[in-house]
Image: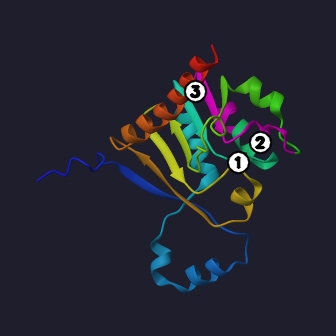
Amino acid sequence: MTDTSMAPQGRARLVVTMPPSPSRIESILAASPAAKLLAFTDTSDAFRHLAMKAQRRLVIMSPYMDAAGCAWVLDMFSYTTASERILVLQSQAELYKPGVDENALRDLSTSIRFYGGGDTDETFHSKIVLADGSDAYVGSANFLWRSKKANLECGLLVDGPVVSSIAILVDAVLGTFELVDDRAE
């Protein structure tokens, strides 16, 4: 029997940013024989992989961004050949944080959108990077210094049919901007 409420299958790799050494998690993993069999993909490597894989569209969704995160986004946009490069943030205030290069972001992106505020209290907390409709990252890493260098962050790098579910969600988020734009006319 097939459960139609389940997304299609796909492959996933664990993506991790480890806290700086020495860390508590590092010492526990070092003591575990099973941990030696683990294969973590570094978050920065996963993001660059997605940027290089995207041919048509690269979408980066993160509620928060600081100077280090801006550099991360700019790196991804500079490595992609995708003609569409979309950044979705929670609010325009993210562009005004110290060290965030708004001009460079606007130059390298084709669209920057803000999914917060408006008529409702609706916002988002998801972190998604979507390369075309074929590969995606879904995880905990914001585009912040702490997510890149200090926090334990975990996510999944996925490919295969399951990415269509992620693409549908991202397209729905992007569709909300058309709704807002239509109301402005």
Q: Is residue 91 magenta?
A: yes
Looking at the rendered image, the disc whose residue lies closer to the viewer, 2 or 3, is 3
Residue lying furthest bottom? 31
Say whether residue 17 is left or right of residue 33: right
Q: Nearer the viewer, residue 34 or 121?
A: 121
Return the mark for residue 94.
2
Dividing the picture into quarters, in which one does residue 122 lie? top right
Could you tell me the amino acid type at mark 1? Tyr
Q: Give the residue drawn at x 49%, y 76%.
A: 35
Q: Give the residue drawn at x 70%, y 48%.
A: 64
* Residue 174 screen position, x and y as percent: 53, 30
Say whether residue 37 is left or right of residue 46: left
Say whether residue 162 is left or right of residue 141: left
Could you tell me the amino acid type at mark 2? Glu
Colour scheme used in the picture?
A: rainbow
The residue at which mark 1 appears reads as: 64
User: Marks 3 and 1, Cα distance to the nearest angstrom?
Assistant: 18 Å
Whether tag 2 and tag 1 are in contact, CB under 8 A, the answer is: yes
For label 2, the SS is helix
Which badge, 2 or 1, comes first in the chain's sequence?
Answer: 1
The residue at which mark 3 appears reads as: 177
* Residue 148 screen position, x and y as percent: 71, 56
Magenta residues (range): 75-97
User: Marks 2 and 1, Cα distance to the nearest angstrom?
Assistant: 6 Å
For label 3, the SS is helix
